[in-house]
Amino acid sequence: MSSTKDSMGRPVVVVTGMGVITSLAAGKTDNWAKLTAGESGIRAITRFATDGLKTKIAGTIDFLPPQPSSAALSESFADLAATEAIAESGVGSQGDFPGPLFVAVPPIEMDWSQRLEVGIKSGANDKVTYDDLLRASPQFPAYHRRFLFRSVAENIAEKFGTKGSPISLSTACASGATAIQLGVEAIRRGETDAALCIGTDGSINAEALIRFSLLSALSTNNEVPSAAARPFSKNRDGFVMAEGAGALVLESYESAKARGAKILGVMQGCGEMTDAFHRTRSSPDGKPIIGCIRNALKDAGIEPDQIDYVNAHGTSTPENDKMEYLGVSTVIGERMKNVPISSNKSMIGHTLSAAGAIEAVVTFMTLQNQRIPPTINYNPDPAIPLDVVPEKARDARVTHAISNSFGFGGQNVSLVMGLEPA
């Protein structure tokens, strides 16, 4: 591999800027300090009433001004993360980003309160036309204009001046990683020298909690919120919903070096594999997850024994953690017992559409700092013999790392990351 081309002759893709916001904090510096201190951002929900709900906790971002809807939250988180990433990168001029936007967003709908208002004023269950909606609720046009038809992406693209049509996507809990993969592929194809990749999610609302509860997917450990997310633990009982955003500025190595940019790391490989086995469950043979990880390693041109760390999908559900163990241990083999694998979700919760991007940012910070954030709330499960970096952060030599994202419907993406090429 030359300094500008990988082993397959494609442009090397590097990261020159990153931004993040989670339930712990806004910005990389504060998030890193709290993650490596093993702090939890999970708390009791105060944004809306939780009477009668089985789950009353989440990784909410309560330190920002309230927003009128989940879609508005998703947009504001994306804005904050992108602002930090572009400022660190120094690419382009203000409002003139020199490449396309790929943004992972949750399925955007009007929240219950908005739908109730429109329904009542328009005649409830009577036949309602679009004109009726506009007449019934003066706010509806604003909701419709801003938060339907890909408008989170449109608004972010307009603010930062990205080029071409912005791409918004949703591949369930792999969405943030998919956004990064699309950016990597666009640069490798020579379509652009830079890409802005974002994963964002602000969909903590009563309806979402109820939907996931009906799937028996959420933890109900309401009494001690900070201990509710327990990835790879014997007593894990479900994931904890959370919100936030991660953003990365990707560039070709040649372009970044030419402008004297500081390189934060290399996006070495991307792998994906969809199994379509079940709308929520993973294929019990683990083949799609195994294939996804192997595809990422092959794309990166490295061997399994070169992996020093795995940033786990690690949701804290009985099914996911078992299947992730099957996947990583099959690919890496017996050595996996000694390869550290930790889950950020133990502290920040599961940020759904944003998870892949947030965890990519954390993985790059792990590479930069040569320090691994812990998995907190750990109670060993004999059926999952992994080194989860329990409770306390650990200094370690990390040259190559994998970040896994496995979504409902079998939508799987793994990313391989490394330090600056020689």
Image (cartoon, rainbow, N blue to C red):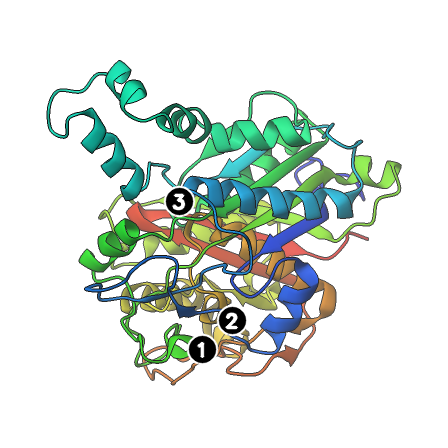
Among numbered discs 2 and 1, the one appearing first in the sequence: 2
Q: Pointer 3: what residue? A: 273
Residue 26 location (% of width, % of height):
62, 58
Residue 23 location (% of width, % of height):
51, 62
Q: Amino acid at mark 2?
A: Ile
Residue 217 appears left or right of 329: left
Q: Do we see residue 281 in this rendering? A: no
Q: Look at the numbered discs 2 and 1 and tell me whether their residues touch, using CB distance below 8 Å.
A: yes
Label 2 to label 3, Cα distance in Å? 21 Å
The residue at the point 44 percent across, 55 percent down is 351
Q: Decide: is 416 above or below 95.
A: below
Which of the numbered marks, if any, corresponds to residue 49? none
Q: In the structure shown, which secondary structural element does the residue marked by tag 3 occupy? A: strand
Q: In the structure shown, which secondary structural element does the residue marked by tag 2 occupy? A: strand
Among numbered discs 2 and 3, the one appearing first in the sequence: 3
* Number of numbered discs visible in the structure rendering: 3
Q: Amino acid at mark 3?
A: Met
Q: Pointer 1: what residue? A: 386
